[in-house]
Image (tube, rainbow, N blue to C red):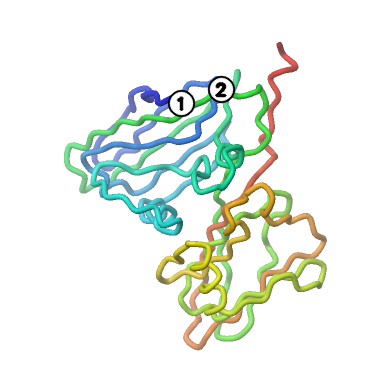
Amino acid sequence: MQRYIKLDSFTAVGPGETANVVLQTGSRYDEIHLKSNQIDQIERVTLTLNAVELFSLTLDELKMLDAYNRVEYISTGHISLPLGLNEAVMLDAQVATGLVTGPGDNAVLEVKFADTAISPTLKGFANVSAHNGVRARVRRFIRYTIPVTGAGQIDFTSLVKGPDVMRMFFKSALIEKLEIKQNDRTVLELDEADNAYLLDRAFKTAPAGYFVFDSIKRDYPVADSMSTQWQNLNFRLTVAEGGAQNISVLVEQVDQTERADWRRAS
């Protein structure tokens, strides 16, 4: 059965404040849920592991991630955080990106409330499970900005290589086409309509105003994540007229740089 525990109490809960809690170590966190009487006044949620930021997401982005996977629920007092991949087909894939913690780790969850929050309360609970003493990977969200000076083709080559890419959320309604080249070989070329069609067939819903590249839309995150281990990796965007604004892209990735093995100490 799934095991749910309460998180320790948050400190500094108040209007305009950043509440925080240190996660107890020793378990794998497959889910974390926040509960508040002022959920809509949450501006940002940040999770760090040993001072490395795993994600720093706005409330709208957290809701968008659920909506993208067609998670349909109504709650005015809860929000879920992106750790495990509940939409994955296989159970081992669902928990593959859960946050494994062990001795010496410092995992800190921060929640920023707006100045307009009124007497906010905040609690958290988590689905945790045992692990084999190894942290093989973590799920991370990294933000980039793509400079855009006008309509036409824009090349994005600044993605940090190493982690595998699961999804990329390009915040622009003016992207007409995406082409991905690995060492000058085209591995993907889709216009907006064809991409939306494939997402819909996979029961995904691209948020309004976004173009989504999803390498794991079949819900096999380990098998289908896109490798970035290429000498030349280029994401070529075709932008429509009126696209003179920079494009923000939220990259969801599987990162192995925070690996840990506590079996050697036992």
Q: Secondary structure at mark 1?
A: loop
Q: Amino acid at mark 1?
A: Met
Instruction: Pick whichever, 9 or 95, lies toward us.
Output: 95
> At which x and y percent is residue 55?
51, 45
Q: Give residue 24's position: percent from left, percent from top.
A: 48, 21
The residue located at (50%, 31%) in the rendering is 29
**What's the CA distance linking mark 2 and mark 1?**
12 Å
Query: SS for tag 2?
Result: loop
Residue farthest along the bottom direction in this orientation: 241
For the residues labelled 2 and 1, say whether their Cβ atoms are less than 8 Å apart. no
Q: In the rendered image, which residue does mark 1 sit on?
A: 1
Which label lies toward us, 2 or 1?
1
Residue at 50% of width from left, 34% of height from top?
30
Q: Is residue 73 above or below residue 188?
A: above
Q: Amino acid at mark 2?
A: Ala
Residue at coordinates 51% horizontally, 40% vertically from top-left? 83
The residue that mark 2 highlights is 130
Q: Quadrant of the C terminus?
A: top right
Crowding at mark 1 (Cα within 10 Å: few <14, some 14-19, many 20+): few
Tag 1 or tag 2, which sits nearer the N-term? 1
Left or right: residue 82 versus residue 33 is: right
Depicted 214 relative to depicted 179: above or below: above
Q: Nearer the viewer, residue 127 or 52?
A: 127
Q: Residue at x 80, y 59 (%)?
A: 230
